[in-house]
Amino acid sequence: MKQLSYLLCLVAAVAANKIPDFVVPGKCPSVDKGKLWSEQTPNHEKYEGVWYQYAVIKNPYHPIDKCVRIEYSFDGRQFEAVSTGITADDRLIKHSGNVYPNPFGEPHLTIDYDNTFAAPYVILDTDYDNYACIHSCIDFNFGYHSDFAFIFSRSPSLSDSHVKRCEDAFKNINFDTSRFVKTYQGSSCPYDSQREL
């Protein structure tokens, strides 16, 4: 229902020639979601636990700016997700949601956080122990689409070789990796405090 409401608002905005800057001309890239889904579904339990955001592209629905830490708890079907970190105006916050199989049977997960709209959550590549490369894209009518992307790490830092694995995964779908901005994960990040929010 959230996604439907969002789409209706977007259609109205497009009709009024007031297109949000994260909605751009073109279509979502071609991704073999079926292959990824069949490979990853048996391993979803390995995906749970703590991840740190290494890099992200501009995302108006992602309120956390730095020290981003995400904890996924898997119940055998879906993940409960809790993201913590610091906003651009230096507030420590927690953002919660769920990641679950697409309710319409499409071969990918769906991410659904508080105060946002549900969106595809496609894991382009992961080794479960070091890195994960996430892409989310929605096609709209009128020849527009919107996409978001993330690079996650199991620790606050990520080796160059693992960064390259994600860059290669994104380049394979013709995604412009220059759009990524590295997330601050430095010594001033209050990871212990975040767990108590």
Image (tube, grey):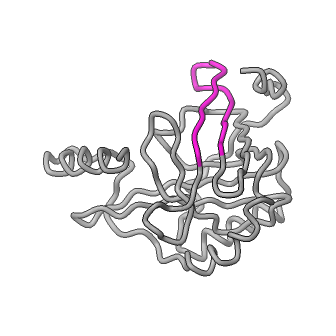
Can you tell which quarter of the image residue 128 is in? bottom right
- Residue closest to the far left: 16
Q: Is residue 161 magenta?
A: no
Residue stretch rendered in magenta on the structure: 80-98
Residue found at x 78% / y 51%: 153
Q: Main secondary structure of the magenta part?
A: strand
Q: Which residue is rendered at x = 47% and y = 39% of the image?
A: 61
In the image, 175 versus 136, the foreground residue is 136
Q: Nearer the viewer, residue 172 or 3?
A: 3
Is the residue 133 above or below the residue 190 in the image?
A: below
Horizontal and vertical percent for residue 189?
79, 27
Q: Is residue 121 left or right of residue 185?
A: left
Q: Is 194 positioned to the left or the right of 86 in the image? A: right
For the point 24% across and 44% down, the residue is 9
Q: Is residue 82 above or below residue 102?
A: above
Q: Position of residue 114 (x, y in %)?
A: 50, 35
Q: Quadrant of the C terminus?
A: top right
Q: How many marks?
A: 0
Q: Position of residue 25 (x, y in %)?
A: 31, 63
Is residue 150 left or right of 191 when viewed as pictured? left
The answer to which of 48 and 92 lies nearer the viewer is 48
Query: 22 or 119: which is nearer to us?
Result: 119
Q: Position of residue 97 (x, y in %)?
A: 57, 40
- Answer whether residue 82 is magenta in the image: yes
**Residue at position x 62%, y 59% in the image:** 134
